[in-house]
Image (cartoon, helix red, strand yellow):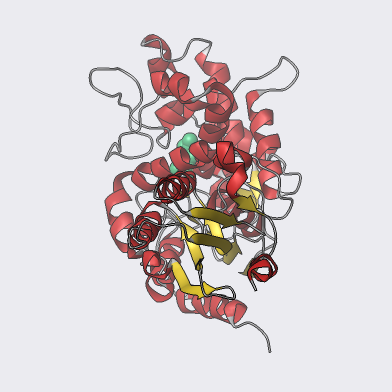
Amino acid sequence: MQTPVPDYLKHVLSQCQRNTDGQLADYIPELAAVDPDKFALALSTVDGTIYSTGDDEVEFTMQSMSKPFAYALALQKVGLTKVMEKVGVEPSGEAFNQISLEKDSNIPKNPMINSGAITTHSLIPYKRTVSRAEQLRRFLSGLAGRELSFDSEVYTSELKTAFRNRSLGYMLRTVGVLEEDPEAIVNGYIKQCSIKVTVKDLAMIAGVLANGGIQPQTGKKLLDRSVVRQVLSVMLTCGMYDAAGDWLTTVGIPAKSGVAGGIIGVLPGQVGIAVFSPRIDEHGHSVRGVDIFERMSREMGLHLMEGTPSAQTILQSCYWAGKNDDVRVYELRGVLQFTESEMLLRNLQEEPPGDTTIVLDLTNLTLIHDVGARMLFEGVERLQQDGHRVVVVDSEGLLSQTQIQKHAAVLVQEELERYLQQYE
Ligand code: GLN
């Protein structure tokens, strides 16, 4: 049999094809010259599979979709504190190119609007021989898993009409947010916007964020978890500018649009989605792109706030084993976060004090968050204080060294069945 996912994507594309509303972004002359009917959709999973349909080989410029990644690179290289001194995290409720600053602090409200993005660009460390835009191109190529390039026509075309972005640059220089020549920084920002991608690249890039910063195809860690969290939070609240509330309620997926017609969306831990269709609405979002995201979120249950009640499944089974039925086994499954750990500890609370051997089997867990590991070992210590002998079976090696810390003595790497043989 063949998976129906590609058929579904094709179906979505054909359903939304009829919509020809919106206009090309004509304030950048080169963007007004593209074929308005190009249309593509791609979806990536956190294990690195990419599905795509339509004009999925067509390259287009990232434009504002480059902003979250410039932000990610700045955060990764100079840290949150330094970045926060220069760019806020509050939704502006204004258009992407609004000439405004946060009231008291005099810094741009967030990194997704142009003033914040120009500032973010200025925070990317660079060398004399490798510009900031080039640093970002290299970084994005790593995320995409292929060498990306600049579109020099679109770049020079936007340079000619970038009066508004220049005025933003000069305003930022006046208040001291920019500390260097604003011309050079604005040019660099415009160059960053001209990085070319296909929907497949975008889906791959989104997949890295969905996967917590690890490139699913190479297994390489490209971003810290804390950076991914920060970037996705800002995408969620500010990524769609003055339509962010509408987007959050109807789609509920952290996302970023670009005026060339792309939208990139990331559902943490689940999927990356990318759309390309060049006609845009008054906010600068691809009209058919918005359509597709709304439809997929609704039909596939992808809204962030849908949240599956995973805590109900943390205990797969709980039974007595051993010759004398005196070994208590807890088999866990799912993801161990706060709510699941709370449920597990509430179950362990039922164990009366005594000298039972208690085995906690982690084999069927898919992920253990730090808080999950901390709470698990807290439970282990409390059971020990009650007189029990506790064993944690981690045959898949899910626990990281930092999560294990001083608890290595209770760990067993064998498979559960084999470990239990000694009690038979
Ligand atoms: N390069 C464009 C600009 O700065 C990007 C805007 C966008 O995609 N919303 O105006």
Q: Compared to 132, does 59 lie above or below? A: below
Query: Quadrant of the rendered structure where residue 116 is?
Result: top left
Q: Compared to 369, does 161 lie above or below? A: above
Left or right, 175 with respect to 273, comes to left
**31 or 86, nearer to the observer:** 86
Note whether residue 271 is visible: no
**Residue 208 in the image: x percent, y percent?**
60, 50
**Residue 67 in the image: x percent, y percent?**
50, 37
Q: Compared to 323, does 220 lie above or below? A: above
- Name the residue at the left extreme: 103
Rendered residue at 46%/43% (across/down): 374
**412 or 397, nearer to the observer:** 412
Rendered residue at 52%/10% (across/down): 180
Rendered residue at 66%/42% (across/down): 221
Left or right, 326 with respect to 108, comes to right
Note whether residue 421 is visible: yes
Query: In the rendered image, which quarter contains the N terminus?
Result: bottom right
Left or right, 52 with respect to 28, comes to right
How many dots with numbers?
Answer: 0
**Residue 83 in the image: x percent, y percent?**
46, 23
**211 or 8, nearer to the observer:** 211
**295 or 13, nearer to the observer:** 295
Query: In the rendered image, which quarter contains the C terminus?
Result: bottom right
**Residue 56 in the image: x percent, y percent?**
66, 64
